[in-house]
Amino acid sequence: MSGPRICFVTSYPLSRQDLGGSGWVDRRLLPVLAGLSDDLEVVCVTGPEGRWSERVGEHEVSARAAGAVPLELRGDRGALARVAAGMLVSPEPYLARKFSVFPGWRKAVELLRQRAAGRRVVTSGWPGLVLGAAAAVPVAAHVAHNVESTIAVEHSPRALRMLGEIPRLRRMERRLLGIPDHVFALSRTDAAELDVAATALPVPLSSAPTVASAGRTVGFIGKASWPPNERALEVLLGPVHDRLSAMGVDVDFVLAGKGTERYAEHPRVVASGSVTDVADFYAQVGVAVVPRFGSSTGVSVKVLEAAEFGVPSVLPRSLAEAIDPDGPWLVAESTDEVAEAIRRWRSGEQAPDAAGWARQQDAARTAALLRNAFA
């Protein structure tokens, strides 16, 4: 039996690994879809205008973009002013108007209309869903990476709140999630909290690691300037470090990511700064610290990435429950609990089998769920 022709809508070219976690997820979902489809094509919300090929697992797929659509406007006051002015004459929230107010959006809409013809459309992430709605194409399935309104409640600046961003976004999110025939959520907890019926979709992981990492340091990876990461580093290098010292635990920290160089003089930091290959980072690391403060939505790509390399994570319960409450985690909520989790790992009292768990994340389960969306 031949498979369906599929148009997969993602935020940006899959080769842009520097642009964030949504692409990391999509690079793992696309090989599954390629195995289900006789004709898989990728449309990017933003990217270089034209057509190119993307390698996904054992498959070569065609990818297209209509040109530049801004996904991130922080620091561009002119663009932000233009979006704010657009919100005064439109009911759209910032998270949609920041796309639609720019000319490149109209070209992206037209591109999707053309490429969706005769194909089953799968959107992945909020920008893709917004584009699908703007193009008015039938959407067979949507993969929600987060609950966008939850993020807005936590992080929307005062100026956007005054423009009604939170209620606008809630209304639009509810409306757009009603468009796809099937809605999937990366997070188990998000699947239960969305305003529509949603199914948790496990991310299939690489089976490359065959043994756990032999590293003996505590690792942290992420851009230091991102506020949640900045706060996490302050906690790790401040009160967690102090608590470990008080317990007499001798362990070093390896920090990876742009901006982490400024912590190089800390007494526990033995390496810091940007890395060209994350495999080099995880080869040094025995456990990763992945904190999250405030409301939780989505899954932590860093937890999944660490597991692919056989490295367990210290993480709050909300992240563990979003991915797998029975997974190989060191669950810690407070500063003292983080330090105690590191102590247990360092002493050998607790050694979660992250590599074994990663190997069990079989793509066949993900494929079976997605196949139902095309039945």
Image (cartoon, rainbow, N blue to C red):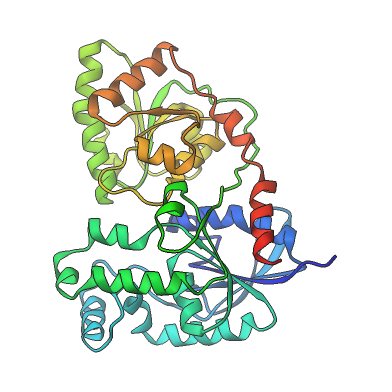
Left or right: residue 294 versus residue 289 is left
Q: Quadrant of residue 26?
A: bottom right
Q: The N terminus appears in which quarter of the rendering?
A: bottom right
Residue drawn where x is 24% and y is 59% of the image: 153
x, y percentage for residue 155? 23, 58
Residue drawn where x is 33% and y is 48% of the image: 296
Nearer to us in this view, 129 or 301:
129
Nearer to us in this view, 149 or 276:
149
Q: Quadrant of residue 250?
A: top left
Q: The C terminus appears in which quarter of the rendering?
A: bottom right
Left or right: residue 221 versus residue 375 is left
With respect to residue 124, does 257 lie above or below?
A: above
x, y percentage for residue 112? 56, 81
Left or right: residue 237 versus residue 370 is left
x, y percentage for residue 59? 73, 59
Total marks placed = 0
x, y percentage for residue 74? 26, 66
Task: Work out which residue is located at the far right of the displayed protein and give it.
Answer: 1
With respect to residue 164, does 23 lie above or below?
A: above
Residue drawn where x is 44% and y is 52% of the image: 192
Residue drawn where x is 37% and y is 82% of the image: 100
Nearer to us in this view, 155 or 234:
155
Say if residue 266 shows up in the picture: no
